Amino acid sequence: MLLLSALVTTAEPVSGPKPQSVLFRNGDAVLYGCIYKPTGTGPFPAVVFNQSATRPSYEKIDWPPFLSLAQFFTAHGYAFFLPGRYAHEGLQNKSASTNKSLPKWAGETEARNADVLAGVTWLKGQSYIDENRIVLCGHSAGAIQALLVAAKDPEIRGTITFSVGAISWKGSTVLQELLQTAVRENTAPVLLLQPQNDVNIEPSRVLGDLLCKKPHPNRVKIFPPFGKTPTEANLFGLNGCDVWGKDVLEFLDAVTK
């Protein structure tokens, strides 16, 4: 069997934390990932970040990936892990033929969940990671993934979402039901963050109502407008760490201490 540890490569030096590309397995499939580590030897708490793209490439295309986010989290002592996900296009949910309410991406979503869970399993096995202090995070479609995966892994300490479902919420009752169920079933706290001028803030309003029934540090916060357009606002999670940073650090401290 191929040892993934032998396949780890380190990128050229960059300013700030240095990214390391890694490979991990989901069954027979091999997926790319990328991790940034804080200064020191650990074990570190970790933030697992799911971006909106279905199949991010963590080779040397657009390298280093998400450096500003990595700088923010590693500066505060957190390892920052980016697990890759395959596209899984065309994969049908097993019950799609009998349940017409399921969209064609229902099976794809489950497959991507499995990819992320495999990445989390890989992360827990690293000696420099504190496997008991892992938090999921995500942006847009990646925030959907983070919420759904957290509901499947009781060891996850918390979930942070930026603009969860903002683009795909409208008109998709199945997605709305999936996310509401995930919020209800998550045993770990959830932090929902979104700017007021995002594409659609209804997800934070609906899911936030559910979170308000849960104890602290479950929380929803809708920030003032960010950027000049809904498209710019939807990138709040990627470009607004100077705005949301305090709230995220308070949440991380509460769930990982």
Image (cartoon, rainbow, N blue to C red):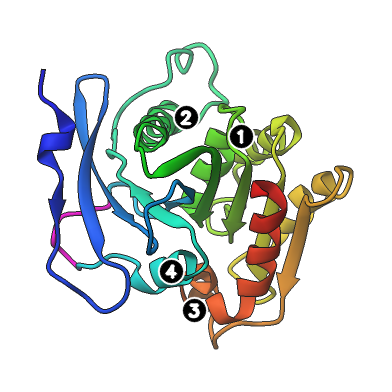
Say if 122 sits above or below 81 in the image: above
Alpha carbon separation for disc pair 3 and 2: 28 Å
Residue 51 in sight here:
no
Label 2 sits on what residue type?
Ala
Residue found at x 12% / y 68%: 12
Helix, strand or loop for disc 4: helix
Please state the horizontal and vertical placement of residue 114, each as a whole percent of the image. 40, 28
Residue found at x 21% / y 75%: 14
Question: What's the mark number on residue 226?
Answer: none
Please state the horizontal and vertical placement of residue 106, each as a whole percent of the image. 47, 29
- Foreground mark, 3 or 2, reads 3
92 horizontally vs 172: left or right:
left
Label 3 sits on what residue type?
Glu
Graded by Cα atoms within 10 Å as few (under 14), some (14 to 19) or many (20 or more), the crowding at tag 4 reads some
Task: From the image, tell me which residue sits under label 2.
Answer: 106
Task: From the image, tell me which residue sits under label 1.
Answer: 174
Question: What's the mark number on residue 232?
Answer: 3
Q: Main secondary structure of the magenta part?
A: loop
Q: Are marks 2 and 1 in contact (CB under 8 Å)?
A: yes
Alpha carbon separation for disc pair 2 and 4: 30 Å
The residue segment tinted magenta is 56-62
